[in-house]
Image (cartoon, rainbow, N blue to C red):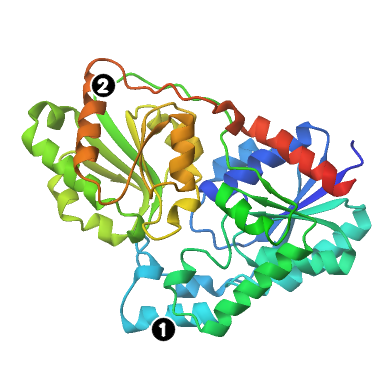
Amino acid sequence: MVDKKILIITYYWPPSGGSGVQRWLNLSNYLVDMGYDVTVLSPEFANYPILDNSLNNELNPLIKILKVPVFEPAKFFKSKTNNSDNIENRGILNYFKLFIRSNFFFPDSRMFWINDVVKSASSFINKNNINCVITTSPPFSLNIIGYKLKLKNNIKWISDYRDPWSDFFQFKKMPMFSNIRKKHFDWEKKCLKTADSVLVTSPSLKTTFSKINPNTHLITNGFDTFKKTIDSTGFEIIYSGVMKSSQNPKMLWKVLAEISMTNKSFKKDFKLSLIGNFDKSIHQNKYLKKLKEQLVFKSYMKKDDLEKKLSFGKVFILCDVNQPGGGNLIPGKFFHYLSYEIPIVAFSSKNSDTSNIINETKSGNVFEFSNEIELKNHILELYTNFKNGSYSVKSIGIEKYKFSNLSSELLTVIKKTID
């Protein structure tokens, strides 16, 4: 098997932090363990929003790294505040920046990386007898890179979609010309048809993409190992990651504030930790301001520190995007949460992929964003369980979401693609 050489092209790679890097960091490690010769091409001088140098320590030393410099005008379109969501911002200047970004950088602001990567990767493929190229998006420029390499080198190509493309939730709010929207749709279809195999992370996306490329496979995100929890006297509710204004669970903040005002025991034990990058609308929420004694905002934590913090949690919060179809993009943090077997309180629409997988694994409960009474009763139930010394959940069937098992599924796809 050692003659099977894989080139993985990804934008997010250590020292990039956040959930976007975890999928292929782990899958690459397991591919090497299974005897594959793996090279990862990633950007040099990338403008990563989050840095976590500790992730370099998790890389298998047998993985070869190929760097290609990237020019990114995206940094000129960022908001002045880290906790603002550009898509939601108002104001003439921000609207103008978003308008330019939406209509003049196709498919995204990493468009200037495409030709340089194609040139470098094409040379590398020919010199090293690469058997298969894997691209992972977003950014969606990676799909065009894969498309061009497929045509130029006649290489086997596996296209991995961590998110949808033309139906990406952020696109729906961007001031984009109709012909640009159509261009995204047309290129998505062209890339899907050209790929030898397609990987997706949610059942709904598999259903959609299979209509274009029948060789579409579901390989979800996952987790590496089960984590230990730590008993503590506090009833700590934790959210980690990015929270955009469209994910804001306003009813949860209202419920927590009301319970704190009427239940002295709850107020004494309760703590709310919001870890990561939050839109300013979350910081300004009137109910969160009432919880200032119990509330702690923390900036992004490197993976090791975050895992220690999560081990103290008694409830985890998960939020989909509060718009049609928003629950059909399963947040990567869900699988990280799974590894602790702590109850998850999720906000999503009924019958969404997120809702279905939580119900299937019995890892928590799902509420619509406007649900108040059932949510309040459930929080009180979780608190009662905590006071009785029982705060974990008995999840079922979650072993299959370990990266060690997901990598076996990936191996099957690779074999079918190459052979």
Identify residue type, mark 2.
Answer: Phe
Residue 157 found in image quarter: bottom right
Vertical order, 321 against 398 (above or below): below
On screen, residue 419 versus residue 229, left or right, reads right
Identify residue type, mark 1.
Answer: Phe
Q: Which mark is residue 389?
A: none
Between disc 1 and disc 2, the foreground one is 2
Does any portion of residue 347 appear in the rendered image? yes
Residue 356, given in percent of the width and then of the height, sits at 47, 40
The C terminus, quarter of image = top right
Residue 380 found in image quarter: top left
Vertical order, 121 against 255 (above or below): below
Mark 1 neighbour density, 10 Å: few (under 14) some (14–19) many (20 or more): some
Do the residues under discs 1 and 2 have CB atoms within 8 angstroms? Answer: no
Q: Between residue 396 and residue 67, name the one nearer to us.
A: 396
Vertical order, 388 against 32 (above or below): above
Q: Secondary structure at mark 2?
A: helix
Mark 1–mark 2 distance (CA, rounded to whole Å):
50 Å
Residue under the image location 45 percent in, 21 percent down: 228
Residue 308, given in percent of the width and then of the height, sits at 42, 30
Residue 261, given in percent of the width and then of the height, sits at 8, 38
Residue under the image location 26 percent in, 21 percent down: 386
Mark 2 neighbour density, 10 Å: few (under 14) some (14–19) many (20 or more): some
Which residue is identified by label 1?
Answer: 96
On screen, residue 381 versus residue 241, left or right, reads left
The N terminus, quarter of image = top right
Which residue is identified by label 2?
Answer: 386
Q: Between residue 186 and residue 253, name the one nearer to us.
A: 186
Residue 236, given in percent of the width and then of the height, sits at 28, 31
Vertical order, 137 against 61 (above or below): below
